[in-house]
């Protein structure tokens, strides 16, 4: 299936169906595909799936067979997307969900990270148009974006999507803080682009004079939500913010990517002769790498009269490792909830065996003759939900009895039945990621059945069953 074919089929499936915002489903689908391109994702099947991501919304539809006839891979991705949209975390507050497993639950649920990327962009676009929703629903959507989809986008290697989700959600949840920060940034950003362009031109000249070639110069302005988090941290630590956040020295950042370590230190010395260093702001992570393995020189300089910027200096190898490797900022800046997730450690271990994982995600301009094969780091486990929204991690092949024992020993011993996704099942029923399980208990039971040993997978379940019979 080609993109023109997907557009034609989408137009037929969606017809003139409209969303609450007033735009048609077809317009929305094209917007998601265009956003993905803007974020650098060019893989054709991903874009086709994005255009057709609402094709299976209706219960009775011929769309699945029509899509499968043209592209089995796109049809498979759409089934995974539909499954993701039907999985709901039922919890009293999105800020209190089980943060230990949330990342790997969703990665494992879809089995293909392309689905999550499409979902994240879909959520971003919906959030931007959430003015059509009631205040309570709009804020709930913003919380979900901030605490779930933004960290997911970051851990999947698309930090631009994450930043846009964070800023849009921040604007909805805390409009007063958002506009206050934006006002301060705009005031300090006046003429920034011009300064950066002049600095870039100037640095290219002086580095060329030193015989330094094949280098990269990048610059950025800190996002609103990231800045908000830093402001809150400074307040908590009793640090001065300065007028219009003038004491936050990484509001603007310049990055130099060079060939060798020697060039890094030579360049820093050159900058120190040209600009005034800000005291106590230098960190040498080349000589003293972070625990993640991250390496770079960080320093802050007064570049112009009222313009201070953080400067990061590193080699191309260090940059690759920082952006796409085990030391990636994706792993230590995942977010309020994601930072505590076991996904971080799991990804680190996975990356030791598959160092290309993040790089594959970030370079999605796949050649037509090269097939993109996504990898899922957590495929040895499944992640299931209690009715209250707690996440239970189990090995593949685990039954509802394994689930019951993971909840509590007594729940396991007294297990008399189970409901999976609202349907009654046998006790040897094998669970899948995303299943919501409700255990029916009978406190009159004297002990668990010894027959359960034939199908339980977890060591804990086997121990408790044997112990109950010994006692």
Image (cartoon, rainbow, N blue to C red):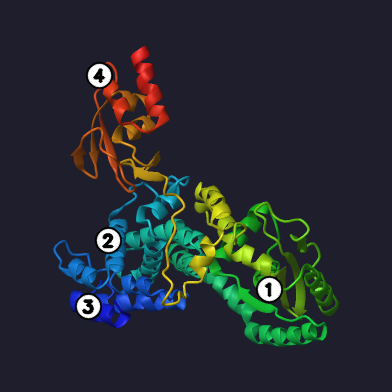
Per the image, the residue denoted by label 3 is: 9
Q: Quadrant of residue 275?
A: bottom right
* Residue under pointer 1: 255
User: Residue 412: which disc?
Assistant: none
Q: Position of residue 365 (x, y in %)?
A: 47, 76
Question: Is the residue under label 2 in contact with that under label 3 (CB below 8 Å)?
Answer: no
Marks 2/1 in contact by CB < 8 Å: the verdict is no
Query: How far is the residue under mark 3 from the one under mark 2?
Result: 17 Å
Between circles 4 and 2, the one closer to the viewer is 2
Say which element carries label 4: loop
Residue farthest along the front direction in this orientation: 369
Quadrant position of the N terminus in the picture: bottom left
Position of residue 402 measured from the top left corner of the image (x, y, whole percent): 34, 33
Residue 450: horizontal and vertical position, in percent?
29, 21
Q: Tell me the distance, in whole angstroms, between the alpha carbons under discs 4 and 3.
A: 57 Å
Q: For the residue labelled by badge 1, is the local secondary structure a helix, a strand or a loop? A: strand
Circle nearer the N terminus (4, 3) = 3
Seen at 22% across and 64% down, the residue is 57
Q: Residue at x 70, y 61 (%)?
A: 295
Label 4 sits on residue = 445
Is the residue marked by circle 1 packed among few (<14), some (14-19), or many (20+) residues within 10 Å?
some
Select label 4 or label 3 by which is in front.
Answer: 3
CA gap, disc 4 to disc 2?
41 Å
- The residue at 84%/73% (across/down) is 269
Quadrant of residue 387 within the rendered picture: top left
User: Mark 2 = which residue?
Assistant: 79
């Amino acid at each position: 299936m080609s993109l023109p074919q997907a557009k034609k089929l989408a137009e037929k499936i969606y017809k003139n169906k409209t969303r609450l915002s007033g735009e048609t489903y077809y317009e929305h689908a094209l917007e998601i595909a265009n956003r993905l391109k803007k974020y650098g994702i060019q893989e054709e099947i991903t874009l086709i799936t994005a255009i057709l991501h609402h094709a299976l919304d209706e219960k009775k539809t011929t769309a699945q067979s029509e899509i499968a006839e043209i592209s089995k891979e796109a049809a498979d991705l759409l089934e995974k997307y539909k499954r993701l949209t039907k999985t709901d975390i039922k919890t009293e507050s999105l800020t209190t969900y089980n943060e230990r497993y949330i990342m790997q639950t969703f990665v494992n649920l879809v089995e293909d990270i392309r689905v999550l990327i499409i979902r994240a962009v879909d959520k971003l676009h919906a959030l931007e148009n959430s003015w059509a929703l009631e205040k309570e629903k709009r804020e709930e959507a913003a919380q979900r974006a901030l605490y779930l989809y933004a960290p997911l986008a970051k851990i999947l290697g698309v930090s631009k999507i994450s930043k846009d989700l964070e800023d849009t959600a921040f604007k909805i949840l805390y409009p007063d803080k958002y506009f206050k920060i934006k006002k301060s940034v705009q005031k300090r950003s006046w003429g920034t682009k011009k300064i950066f362009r002049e600095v870039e031109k100037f640095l290219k000249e002086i580095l060329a004079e030193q015989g330094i070639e094949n280098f990269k110069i990048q610059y950025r302005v800190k996002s609103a939500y990231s800045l908000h988090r830093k402001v809150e941290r400074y307040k908590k630590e009793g640090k001065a913010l300065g007028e219009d956040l003038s004491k936050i020295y990484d509001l603007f950042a310049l990055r130099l990517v060079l060939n060798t370590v020697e060039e890094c230190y030579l360049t820093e010395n050159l900058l120190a002769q040209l600009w005034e260093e800000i005291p106590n702001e230098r960190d040498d992570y080349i000589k003293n790498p972070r625990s993640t393995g991250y390496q770079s020189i960080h320093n802050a300089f007064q570049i112009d009269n009222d313009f201070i910027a953080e400067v990061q200096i590193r080699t191309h190898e260090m940059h690759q490792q920082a952006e796409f490797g085990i030391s990636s900022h994706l792993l230590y800046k995942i977010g309020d909830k994601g930072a505590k997730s076991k996904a971080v450690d799991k990804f680190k271990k996975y990356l030791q065996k598959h160092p290309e994982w993040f790089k594959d995600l970030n370079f999605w301009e796949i050649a037509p003759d090269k097939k993109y094969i996504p990898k899922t780091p957590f495929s040895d486990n499944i992640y299931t939900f209690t009715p209250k929204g707690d996440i239970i991690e189990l090995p593949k092949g685990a039954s509802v009895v394994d689930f019951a024992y993971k909840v509590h020993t007594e729940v396991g011993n007294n297990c008399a039945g189970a409901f999976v996704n609202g349907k009654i099942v046998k006790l040897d029923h094998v669970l899948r990621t995303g299943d919501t399980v409700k255990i029916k208990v009978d406190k009159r039971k004297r002990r668990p059945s010894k027959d359960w040993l034939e199908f339980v997978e977890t060591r804990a379940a086997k121990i408790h069953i044997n112990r109950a019979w010994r006692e």
